Image (tube, rainbow, N blue to C red):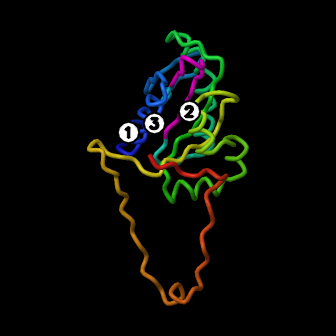
Amino acid sequence: MEAHARLVEWVVRRLQAFGWDVAVEVSFSRDGERGSIDVLAFHPERRALQVIEVKSVTPDLQAMLGGLDRKAGVAPAIARERGWDPVTVARALVLGDTRTNRRRLEAHDGTIRAVLPAGTREITRWIADPVGPAPVGAWLVAEVRGADGNPVRRHRVRARRTRSSVHGSSKPGSGPAGGHKAEAP
């Protein structure tokens, strides 16, 4: 839960720095749909709406993608109830940039590219100036800072080197799925 809260806080601060009005944990019950949107943001000048699902770990991919789509469907009505009048809606899945998350994205690369084609750079560029088509994509956050402002460090457990790995018989790893480069805060 702490990792999720840090990611949400980081996203909120990033959006606010670019002039977005931000609401967090926006609950809804509309047309038989119930739930909450992690981060709902509106850029008043551009009339752009951003729906963000934040995950510190990637659980069931299908449920996660379905949830983001469902939330984006009800978001414009929720925005209008708040006095926001969006003309465009962007969707982003924000993930902590961990080996596990990258591995899970890579395992479902075709699905991710089809459903969330935009990467971190495209999403963050649009957030800085929301002009043009609203991106739908995955946004990887490489480092999150704690309440004290210092980077939160992940503890890595390193496997012992075996004789074969010392002599170069291990294979190099592959890059991130879908070109989703992580963004350091």
Give the distance between the C-alpha atoms of the residues marked 2 and 1, in whole angstroms. Answer: 20 Å
Q: Which residue is mark 1?
A: 5
Q: Residues within 10 Å of mark 2 (few under 14, many from 20)?
A: many
- x then y, percent, for residue 78: 54, 16
Tell me what residue is drawn at x 35 percent, y 56 percent. 153
Give the side of residue 132 with respect to residue 36, left or right: right
- x then y, percent, for residue 68: 59, 33
Q: Which residue is mark 2?
A: 127
Asked if residue 136 is among those painted magenta in the image, a careful observer would answer no
Judge whether 105 appears above or below 21 on screen.
below
Identify the amino acid type marked 3.
Answer: Val
From which residue to which does the magenta span run?
A: 41-54
Give the distance between the C-alpha atoms of the residues marked 3 and 2, in whole angstroms. Answer: 11 Å
Q: Which residue is mark 3?
A: 11
Give the side of residue 16 with respect to residue 138, left or right: left
Identify the amino acid type marked 2.
Answer: Ile
The label nearer to you, 2 versus 1, is 2
Mark 3 / mark 2, whichever is N-terminal: 3
Q: Nearer the viewer, residue 179 or 54?
A: 179
Mark 1 / mark 3, whichever is N-terminal: 1
Give the side of residue 1 with respect to residue 164, left or right: left
